[in-house]
Amino acid sequence: MRRIPEPELMDDPEQAAAYAAADFSDANRLFLALFAEKFPGHEPRQVVDLGCGPGDIPLAFARRHRACRVVGIDGSAAMLAIARRQRESCPELRERLDFRLARLPGAALPAGFDTVLSNSLLHHLADPLDLWREVRRLGSPGAAVLVMDLIRPRSEGEARDLVHRYAVGAPPVLQRDFFHSLRAAYTVAEVRSQLVDAELAGFEVAPVSDRHLAVWGRLP
């Protein structure tokens, strides 16, 4: 199936609310488990999450890693409003979470993060190198990097099967967005090529579920 891009931002309030209310707990648990598996012994201190959405990953990461501070950036004001409400409901994490409105490339953040995260942003980007260049710019030498995203299925039929398997019963707007996101996702081979172009060929990339791939490594 050829790639069909989708809009970069999820800025419609109804769309953002449907996304935030959806149950992504399995994918979030997978992301956290992958980080623990790929970076044993790593103690995050300064963390950036690129495309943080409603803030689920930053909150979960801050709970698990109690010494870290997490900066989450997203280009959607509607998503960040939800992330900030989640932060306010967790007073014990409030001082360690910072959500900022920013788009790639050119997020107004200084370099020097020891941990760079991103979940489900890559397929939204018209130019995937925008993500990989920002990863290189923001991370300090030796920084731990974990990026997870959808994998594009081989056909629209496979994409519809995945929607039926994982989004049955979800609001129509979410089912539609999931289908469009699957069509906009990249393949493992395409991501490998992106990493070569970004001078990150030492990173690993592999499927990690029937609908996700992950990229991990340490910055040179």
Image (spheres, rainbow, N blue to C red):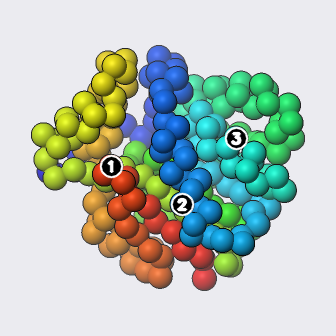
Image coordinates of residue 9 in percent, x first then y, are 46, 36
- Mark positioned earlier in the residue sequence (1 or 3): 3
Mark sitting on residue 59 = 3
Q: Quadrant of residue 209?
A: bottom left
Residue sitting at x 63%, y 51%: 49
Q: Residues within 10 Å of mark 1 (few under 14, many from 20)?
A: some
**Where is mark 1, residue-wise?**
211
Amino acid on which the number 3 mark rests in the picture: Leu
Question: What secondary structure is marked by label 3?
Answer: helix
Q: Is residue 44 above or below residue 151?
A: below
Which of pointers 3 and 2 indicates the residue nearer the eye?
2
Quarter of the image containing the C terminus?
bottom right
Question: What secondary structure is marked by label 1?
Answer: loop
Image coordinates of residue 168 in percent, x first then y, are 30, 24
Mark sitting on residue 34 = 2
Residue sitting at x 50%, y 59%: 147
Amino acid on which the number 1 mark rests in the picture: Arg
Mark sitting on residue 191 = none
Q: Report how far apart the C-alphas of labels 3 and 2 lie in the structure.
A: 17 Å
